[in-house]
Every structure is written in C-alpha cells, then in structure tokens.
Image (cartoon, helix red, strand yellow):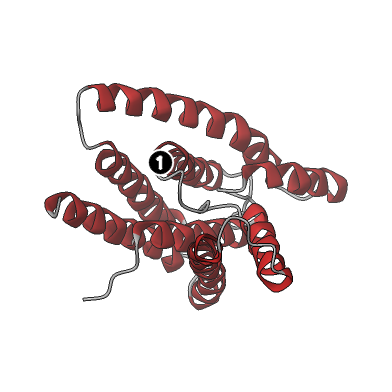
C-alpha cells in the first residue's frame, strides 16, 4: 500500500498549519514565525488586532526548540525512540488545538485569550516539528519554509540544463526529486487549508492531528520493519 513518506506528510502539515493559522488567527504565522515581524508591523500600522500573539510567537518558538532539543538529546542517550515520542507530543498539541477550536471558534477577536492560546499551542507544535526535522531528518528538505528549497530546485535545474553536473546527474536528480515532493506537499497543504477554512473556519483544525497521526503510524511501521 502506497504511503507518503514522513517528510512529505510533515511538509503538507507545515503548509496547512501555517495557512490555517494565518487565515483563522488574524494573520498569525505558526510555523514561519519570523514572518510575524511583518504582520506585526502591519497590525501596528493599521490598528488591527493580534499584536500580542505575534509578539509572543518567536520567543515561545525559540524556547520550545531549545527544550525539545535538550529533551531529545536526553532521550537519545537512553536509546528511546525520539522521533516517535516527539511526533506523539506534536499530535497531542494539535489535538488540543482542535478541541480549543471546536469549543471556542470561530476566532473573531484576535486578542481574546482563546485566540492567543490556540495560536501559542500551534506555535509550540510547529516548533517541535522544526526541531524533529533539524535534529533527526536533516538530510531531507525543510518542512515549513520553502524559500531555500525553491532556490535549490532552480539551481539544480540550471545545472542540469547547462551541463554543470560535477556532482553527478544522479545526485542532482535524486535531490530534485526529494525537494520537488516537499515543495509540492507544502503547496498542496496551503491550498487544502484555504479550502478547509472556507468550508469551516472551525473544523479545519481537525486535519493537522490526522496528518501527524499518519506520520506517527509510518514511524511505528518503519521501526517495526528494522
């Protein structure tokens, strides 16, 4: 049975959660957290809401990455299944965000406690995802920020076209394949989130825990097949 690899599922989730958060939570980026500097400036300039969540996102993201990395290192030292544990934590966080959304949504007041709270839960979840990628899937393309991936795809295509293949065509084509899948998954995630939000600005929060549940299932099957 065909299954999307974990990096592709995480890329889809990255695009979905970032788009969903932006649409449902007054322009909050939950994965591409540095983008909140731009939306914070816009909020201050136009007098719109959501400034508090945008101010909190980056420092919270940094703290969670730090804690996750330290915890992951401790788990590795004990030979625990780090990726499985971290994906489980991420699943719980996204499930919690789903419950908050169903209970309190839709989020019309950008500065309400429920709106800021669900935003920070999503930022925490995506910080865990970013740490999992950096620490345990570093050979795969990023799952939340596609600027570098898009640039590398264009560089590789240029090298293939110009014949600058000192690395070897097979190496470049293999990298292109992985990056194209990641980029496509992310883009489809963004489009899917927009469609889901239009269908229901509350129930669109159900999708992310399902995606991470699938990734967790794949991780368990990979460990069983070793």
Residue 213: quarter of image:
bottom left
Q: What residue occupies the far left of the structure in this picture?
A: 224
Q: Please state which of residues 201 and 82 is positioned toward the viewer in this rendering.
A: 82
Q: Position of residue 217 (x, y in %)?
A: 22, 57
Looking at the image, residue 206 sits to the left or right of residue 56; the answer is left
Quarter holding the N terminus is: bottom left
- For this rendering, which residue is in front, 104 or 135? 135
Residue at image x 46%, y 52%? 140
Residue 117 in picture, x, y percent from top left = 50, 41
Depicted 123 relative to depicted 185: above or below = above
Crowd tier of the residue under label 1, counting other residues whose Cα lies within 10 Å: few below 14, some 14–19, many 20 or above: many
- The quadrant in which residue 183 appears is bottom right
The image shows residue 55, relative to residue 26, as above or below, that is above
Q: Quick check: can you spot residue 144?
A: yes
Q: Position of residue 216 (x, y in %)?
A: 26, 53
Q: Residue at x 74, y 41 (%)?
A: 37
Give whichever of 198, 91 is nearer the camera. Answer: 91
Q: What residue is rendered at 12% in x and 52% in y?
A: 224
Instruction: Looking at the picture, tell me which residue is in the foreground, 82 or 198.
Output: 82
Residue topped by disc 1: 132
Q: Is residue 118 left or right of residue 37?
A: left
Q: Position of residue 33 (x, y in %)?
A: 62, 43
Q: Is residue 114 left or right of residue 222?
A: right
Residue 27 appears in the rendering: no
Q: Looking at this rendering, what residue extends furthest in the right direction?
A: 45
């Amino acid at each position: 049975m065909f299954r999307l690899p974990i990096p592709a599922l995480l890329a889809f989730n990255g695009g979905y959660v970032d788009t969903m958060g932006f649409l449902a939570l007054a322009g909050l980026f939950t994965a591409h957290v540095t983008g909140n500097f731009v939306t914070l400036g816009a909020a201050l300039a136009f007098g719109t809401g959501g400034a508090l969540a945008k101010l909190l996102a980056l420092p919270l993201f940094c703290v969670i990455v730090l804690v996750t990395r330290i915890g992951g290192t401790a788990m590795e030292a004990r030979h625990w299944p780090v990726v499985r544990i971290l994906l489980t934590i991420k699943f719980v966080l996204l499930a919690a965000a789903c419950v908050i959304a169903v209970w309190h949504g839709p989020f019309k007041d950008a500065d309400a406690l429920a709106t800021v709270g669900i935003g920070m839960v999503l930022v925490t979840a995506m910080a865990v995802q970013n740490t999992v990628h950096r620490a345990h899937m570093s050979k795969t393309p990023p799952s939340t920020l596609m600027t570098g991936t898009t640039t590398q795809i264009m560089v590789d295509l240029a090298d293939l076209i110009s014949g600058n293949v000192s690395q070897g065509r097979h190496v470049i084509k293999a990298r292109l394949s992985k990056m194209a899948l990641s980029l496509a998954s992310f883009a489809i995630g963004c489009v899917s989130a927009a469609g889901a939000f239009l269908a229901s600005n509350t129930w669109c929060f159900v999708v992310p825990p399902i995606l991470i549940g699938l990734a967790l299932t794949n991780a368990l099957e990979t460990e069983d097949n070793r």
